[in-house]
Amino acid sequence: MAACRMGERHLGGWLWFLATSLFPVSVISGISGYFQAFRNIRLWVYWILCAFLGFIIPLFMGLVGATLMLILEYGFERVVTPSTEITANDIMHDYFKLAPRYALMVLPVTTPFLALWLKGMQALLTYVENKG
């Protein structure tokens, strides 16, 4: 049991990062397949979609990641049960208040990154399609 706890602490922030990045990466891969099928999409639609995903992905990763780390640290019952003293539940509510602000603050970075990622995935899919 102690070795398991030590392993959880050793992973630190990487555990929540890996656990929460699977869903957004799957969504981005699916959207790149969509763009591959419909290549003649308007540029402004593309940038709106990148901005939307650039907001949703950090919001999702921040909320789910913070919740997972609090559950690992304090246990499920202490995170979801409100009490009169300052607990993990209060910390989680603070994360839920700050996550949308954080997602908006990183939007200028995530939007161009997602645009490049989607174009790279589209180029990879085009390469695989032409190769086969």
Image (tube, grey):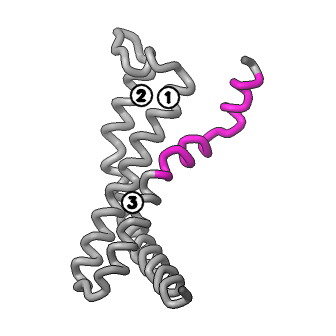
Look at 31% across and 48% down and name the residue there.
100
114 versus 123 height, above or below: above
- Asked if labels 1 and 2 touch by Cβ distance under 8 angstroms, the answer is yes
Of the numbered discs in the image, which one, if any, rests on residue 70?
1
Q: Could you tell me the amino acid type at mark 3?
A: Val
Residue wearing tag 2: 91
Q: Alpha-carbon distance for marks 2 and 1? A: 8 Å
Q: Is residue 49 magenta?
A: no
For marks 1 and 3, give the one nearer the viewer: 3
Packing grade of label 1 (10 A; few <14, some 14-19, many >=20) is some
Q: Is residue 15 magenta?
A: yes
Of the numbered discs in the image, which one, if any, rests on residue 123?
none
Q: Alpha-carbon distance for marks 1 and 3? A: 25 Å
23 versus 80 height, above or below: below
Which portion, as a residue range, is magenta? 3-22
Quarter that holds the C terminus: bottom right
Q: Is residue 51 left or right of residue 62?
A: left
